[in-house]
Amino acid sequence: MSEIKEPFLKRPFDLIFSALGLIVSFPLQIIISLAIYTEDPGPVYFVQERVGKRGRLFRAIKFRTMKYCENNKYLDIDLEEDPRVTKIGKILRAIGLDELPQLINILKGDMSFVGPRALPLGIEDGERSHYRSIKEIPGYYLRSQVFPGLTGLAQIYAPKDASRKDKFYYDNLYVRNMSFLSDLKLIFRSFWVTFKGKWESREKKAL
């Protein structure tokens, strides 16, 4: 398979707007940090190793949305009404602001604004009976040829509780039809999902 070439303007866009986003959102990030610590004292950020482009591992940073867990041992299991999630965490997840610190990952070149979701290598939920790592899931190779994204086709259109295999289908559809214009459209739709507070919805998030 030939190397996947990402749109020429993709990286310049990521650099400029991640830097701008970090500057503009700095006061908001301070407020969010205080709210997280006030409700549940502990680290404000949640840092976890994720799989990036061509399988390279990197440390993704997010706001902590779960109750403080010693040694940072949070199982990567998705529950519809997760008792581990704090009140402020539930709000942050609904509007997608828990991932605001990942602007740092975009600026560093670990991620892009648009692409497949950055996932941990190991699988800990019910799918572990079928796969031990995401590398074993059909469709992994193609999606791994591009930078993971803050948002993307699967994040917006695939049901939240869809299988990883189904989400990889959306990811690969994005990779095969990737363009700078499609990135802009997905970013626009992401703002709409944020405005509606539907990032945690298990139904269709955008038209």
Image (cartoon, rainbow, N blue to C red):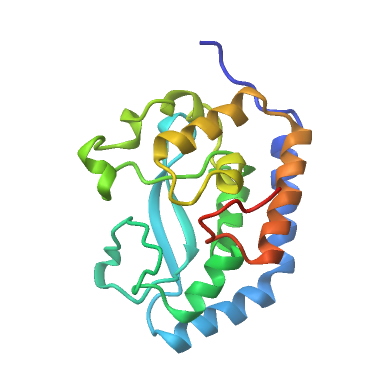
Residue 120 x, y percent position in the rendering: 37, 46
Residue 69 against residue 41 in the figure, above or below:
above
Q: Nearer the viewer, residue 23 or 172?
A: 172
Q: Nearer the viewer, residue 32 or 203?
A: 203
What residue is shown at x 53% (from left), y 40% (from top)?
148
What residue is shown at x 37% (from left), y 57% (from top)?
78
Quarter of the image for residue 44 reads bottom left
What residue is shown at x 45% (from left), y 35% (from top)?
166
| Residue furthest left as drawn | 129
Residue 195 x, y percent position in the rendering: 71, 65
Residue 8 x, y percent position in the rendering: 74, 28
What residue is shown at x 69% (from left), y 45% (from top)?
14
Quarter of the image for residue 104 reads bottom right
Residue 180 against residue 190 in the figure, above or below:
above
Residue 58 as seen in the image, left or right of residue 152:
left
| Residue furthest front as drawn | 203
